Every structure is written in C-alpha cells, then in structure tokens.
Amino acid sequence: MTTTPDTTAATQTTTLLRFATAGSVDDGKSTLVGRLLHDAKAILADQLEAVTRTSEERGFVGGAFDFALLTDGLRAEREQGITIDVAYRYFATDKRSFILADCPGHVQYTRNMVTGATTADAVVVLIDARTGATEQTRRHLTVVQRLGIRHVIVAINKIDLLDYDQVAYAKVEHEVEELAEEIGLDTAHLIPVSALAGDNVAAASANTPWYSGPSLLELLETLPSKEEDTADLEPFRLDVQSVLRPQGGLAPGLDPEQFRDYRAVTGQVTSGRVHLGDEIDVHPAGVRTTVIGIDTADGPLESAGAPLSVALRLADDIDTARGTVLAAAGTLPQPRKIVRAEVFPFTAQGLHSGDRVLVKAGTTTVKALVRIESKRNLTTSVSEPAEVLAGNDIGVAEVKLASALPLADFREHGRSGGFLIIDPQTGATVAAGIHTPAEEGTA
Amino acid sequence: MSIDHAPLSTNEPLSTLDVLESEAIHIIREVAAEFEKPVLLFSGGKDSVTVLHLAAKAFWPAKIPFGLLHVDTGHNFPEILKFRDETAARYDIELSVAKVQDYIDDGRLRERADGTRNTLQTQPLIDAIADGGYDAVFGGARRDEDKARAKERILSLRDEFGQWDPSNQRPELWNIYNGRHTVGEHVRVFPISNFTELDVWSYIERENIALPHLYYAHEREVFNRDGMWWSTGEFSTPRAGEDVVRKSVRYRTVGDMSCTGAVESDASDIASVLAEVAVTTVTERGATRADDRISAAAMEDRKKDGYF
C-alpha cells in the first residue's frame, strides 16, 4: 500500500474556499447541505447509519432521509427540529477543499449570518421556488450586501415541485433580480436546484435543459477565494501581534550567535502582499521604514501575501508593539478618533446612544463611546433616525475612539475596516462594526 | 533553519494546508499575546502533536512561551507516555501531569463499573487548570470530529466549573478573537478547528512530524468487541467468547486504553496511512472510541461538563 490517491495530494496543492449558507428549514437548507455533503462523498458510513436509524425513529420511511440530522449538532436542536448556532462542515473534491458555515436562518439571523459571512468567500442564499423571494430573503440578501460578500449565490430550490417549468422559474428569477437591484447587490449567481432530487447540486441536471449555467458545486469549485481575488490588488497591511525577541529563550537547536540581535514583528498579512525591500508606513509611530526580512520557521521568503502568518524584520529600530499597523508606503488609512460605522448588534440588549464599549480592531482594543444615528428599515431599505438598535437590527453609528485608529474603508478594503464591539462588563461581543466613511443618507 | 539562505519565491496561490497553518499560527500568537498564562493540553496524540508543532513555528526562532499539561488516566499506552516525555524534552518545554489515579487512590473519584476512565479526566483537568492558574488552554480538538464539536468556537469560554454553554457562544468575526473573561473563567482554544482528519495527516506528512508508533501498523495481540480491535492488557481483558488473535493493526486515535480500539491495517508509513484515511468510510471516533457510541449527544454532554 504505497500508492496515494489523488485526494491525498489534493489538500497539499488545492485551494480552500470558505462559504456560508443561509435560508430557513422550510427552504430546504438542511437538505441542500446534506445533499452537497452526500454528493461530495463527505458523509461517512457510521454517520449515515446513525442518521438513517434516527430518521426511521422519526417516521421517515423507505430509506428516506432527514438530512437535517446530519447538521444539527446539539441535543436541543435535534429535539426541536431547529438550528440554533452556526455549524461548520468540511468536504473536498479533487479540485478544492471547502469549509461550509451552515447558518441558521430564523433565530438570531443577523448574529449567525454575520458570524458565517465575515469569514466567507461566498454565501449561498436559499429560496423556495414555490414562494419566491420572501421577507427573509430580503433580510439575508441585505446582510450579505452590507457585509460586501464577494460572491452571492441564490439557489432557487424545489424546482422539481414546479415540474422544472422554465416559465415559472423565470418569474422567480426576475423577482430575485429586482430585489437584488433594489438592495444594491451588484451581481448574484442564480441556480435552479432541487436539493431533494439532486438537480444542479453536484452535476448539471437533464431536467433543466433551459439552464446552461454551472451546478452549485461546479460554481463553488471555480470561484476565486478572497485572497486569490485581491492579494495582488489590495495594498499590503499587517496588524502586529507581538515582537519576537528570542534572546530570552531560543528554540532548541538554534545557534545563539546567529540570533543575538534578532528582532521581528509577527502577524498575519491582512491584505495585499509585501516584498523584501518594500517601504512601509508604521502606525502609531508615524514613521516610514523598509522590510529587510520576511521570516517563517521554514525559511525566509521573497514576498508574502494574505493570509500568510509571517515575522517581519524592519530596517529601523522603532516602536512596533502589539497593535501597531504596518501598511504599504502611502496607503495607511487616515487614523481617526471619530468614525462612522455600520453596526450589527447581536444581543437582546441591543446597542444604544451613550453606550460605553470596547472596540477591538485588528490587534488593538480601545475604549469607545457609541452614538446611534439611524436604523435601516429592512423592508424598505431606507434609513430612519434612531437612538437605539435592537438585536438583529442594522444601523449606522458614530463611534468615538479613545485613541485614533487607521481603520480602512470597509466597502473598499474589506476586513481591515471591520471591528468588534465588546461590552466591557460582561466581555461579550455585542455587535459587529464596519467602517463606512463615505456612505451617507439612505445608501 | 537559518535566516541567511536565499529567500523562497512564493507567488503561487496558497494551498489549503498553507491557509490552515497560517490561521492556526495566528490564533496561537493572539492567545500568547493576550493571556497571562496559557498552557497546551498534550496527550501525545496526533492532534496535540500537530498543535505543538504549530506553536513551535509560531514563535520561531524563540522557544514556545508556555508549557504542556497532560491528564493521565492511568490507563495510557506506555509508548505514548514515553513519547510525551521525549517530546517535551525535545522542545525544551515544561510538562505538568495531572493523574486520575491519584484521585481514585484518595477517594475523590470512584472507578466506574465499566472500567472506562475517559469521563473521569474532567475533574483532574479542571483542578489542574485552577491550580496552575491557567487562563487559556490550547487543545487539538477539530470540528470535523463530532457534531457537537462542529458548533465549537475557536476561542471557547468556560466558567469556573469548566462548563460549556453551547447556546450562548460568542460570535467569531473575521480573524479577530475576543478572549475577555472574568476571574475564575478560562478560555479553551482550538487552533486546528478547521483541519479535517485528512488535513492533519497531510500536514504531518508535509512537515515530517514525528508520531508515536501506535499510529502505524504493527503486530499486536487483540480481541474483537463490538467491531473494534482491543489490545489485550491490564485494562482491557477479553471476556468469554472473545478470542485473542495476533493481527496487524493501527490506532486512528490514541486515548485511554480502556476505551480506544484499533483498526486492522497494513499502513506502516505516513503515505499508506494517508491513502487509508483518504478512502475511509467510517469517522475516526465512530471507528475507535467506545465512549462516543453511547448516544448521539455523548460528546455534547461531556463537553458541557468541562471535558475537553
């Protein structure tokens, strides 16, 4: 047994795509996720056996399958037939590895969707073809649009119950396109699927000859990931985690002479790519220096792109404590003490004008004061003045920071404009915030 | 590794393993920077060995700035304990051991009727965390292991009783982790949450990480119970009708001898183990852990109770 199947080599050479699914049980989300895992052969015999056994106990007959049992991990979820929390699923094809954040749609949907979507390259929103776009579809697509998800896929499910009728599908398609335009969602991939029957999930279906696009899995296999898309377009940025000075204790086996003066900053490249010899700006030191070494335990590199974790050596001996931001020369966002942000409160207590909170951005945590400006009406997509946001609301706030932070514009640069809002007393993460300096009014 | 040789050119897209490795290193560095006293739970099993390897890479060329903690059930494979001690010495890292046997000897814990000691680990673990003053505890748990673990956060808050509240978890956004906790609480940290079993094996191969020999096929006296192969020994003796045979087996997980079974295998090196894992049809816990077969919520119940 020395031959190695293709799947083995795969995880060492293929790329990773993280995606999230949103939709309610009624839309057939659990069935779609189950189907995707099943068709990608990610469900193993003992799991299948357990699900079949429980399906029979629940009255599913003739080998029919309650796919939701595969994804609902908690006792309370199985007992109530609901999904409480985001669950992570893993599968791979010979082209790619996938991490699926399975987000429940109806309970605390903002919290769950924001959690799943902030790390996702793509989001699949499910719609029941019979009902078309609903209030909830609008909410899901709004969150996805506000969070700037790169690839939005709308799976129009239960197409089998429309007898694969092209005209009926076209009607739903048109409805979704109108909604997307109204919300401001530029592009979305629309796919007619039947999770139950498997149409257009893993492979193109013969039942929908009028649909010429890819199956869901084919699309997921070919979408560029966030880093692939932007590593060489975005400016380099790194949030410093710590300063490495091995003089106190060198790893076993290394030569103390060689590392006598070693000093580097550690961090994961947040965006872009850094090359040896690049000039960078350092916040808050306010100085410019040069990268003279990009180190990893495997040896030095010529360049490093997001999301690689590296240690950088800099030409000048400057203050680069934890919380320092490094950015390609001339690209560091203007550090600001007052920022305008779109906020997504998660908890029942909501977020109020006058709340004293902590803001954690990158590797910095600062005290902050919140003033709510407006709340987005999720039915009309119009902003209305507000002082309070409840959990699951979306709104705009002015956040006054105890010290200036170089937050990027989230709409342009993604995650380096995102931050957590933390309750200093309980330590809980009560909201997500994204820096949106340019947007005014109802946009 | 030196810092003097020519830099590598790296313009290709990062592989899945590169991305997973960078994520784990980021998490380990965040926790080391923000917590007072982290510790790494180390059993000598492949997952904790992988986390230790990642920790070494995260702080290179400095040594790992925290120690190791092992909860010894008293039923561990002798090969594993030897490997554990040698590995700690090789990394020049402090190792603390909490012993279930001590608790049984002085009556704080009672031996279970079925002889399994896996669930008995929880009390010594929570005590060791409190006594050591650890505020962050790294573990090698992965989300693909079990349905309850699929819901686990990367940083998971535990109260002073070590309990997990799955319905009230902090959302985790981007790569920004919130590890705030009050006195008495601690945080469990799972840097390889997003690795699958296959990823771990691929990574072990790529990085050439040393593992205990139990993971590779070897000849052993075993008997069959409930479809698993059990090693004959002090802690697992065959009952009437369970014949002892000599077989080539390997372990997919390495835990307490009283609840960890082996699988038949001829895979004696990493490449052949990888080939086996890639085409496996049964999960590693389903195949080799008796304690996870008890009920659909076996892992959830243990986790809520403070198990790791």
Image: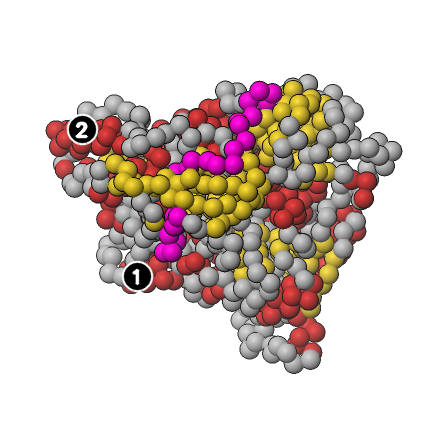
Q: Secondary structure at mark 2?
A: helix
Q: Amino acid at mark 1?
A: Gln
Q: Residue, x 55% and y 77% (percent of image)? A: B113
Q: Amino acid at mark 2?
A: His
Percent position of residue A425, x then y = 51, 58
Answer whether residue A338 is magenta in the image. Answer: yes
Q: CA distance from mark 1 to mark 2?
A: 35 Å
**Are labels 1 and 2 assigned to the same chain?**
yes
Q: Residue furthest right?
A: A257
Q: Is residue A147 above or below residue B252?
A: above
Q: Residue, x 31% and y 25% (percent of image)? A: A186
Viewer-proximal residue among A181 and B119: A181
Give the side of residue A217 with respect to residue A181, left or right.
right
Q: Which residue is mark 2?
A: A174
* Image quadrant occupied by the N terminus of chain A: top right
Q: Chain of mark 2?
A: A
Percent position of residue A301, x then y = 67, 25
Lower position in the chain sequence, tag 1 or tag 2: 1
Answer whether residue B85 is magenta in the image. Answer: no
Viewer-proximal residue among A125 and A233: A233
Q: Which mark is residue B238?
A: none
The crowding category of the residue bearing disc 1, from other C-alpha atoms within 10 Å (few below 14, some 14 to 19, many at least 20), is: few
Q: Which mark is residue A80?
A: 1
Q: Which residues are magenta?
A: A328-353
Give the side of residue A44 with respect to residue B126, left or right.
left
Snapshot quadrant of residue A256 = top right
The crowding category of the residue bearing disc 2, from other C-alpha atoms within 10 Å (few below 14, some 14 to 19, many at least 20), is: few
Give the side of residue A200 with respect to residue A38, left or right.
left
Percent position of residue A316, x then y = 74, 26
Q: Is label 1 or label 2 in front?
A: 2
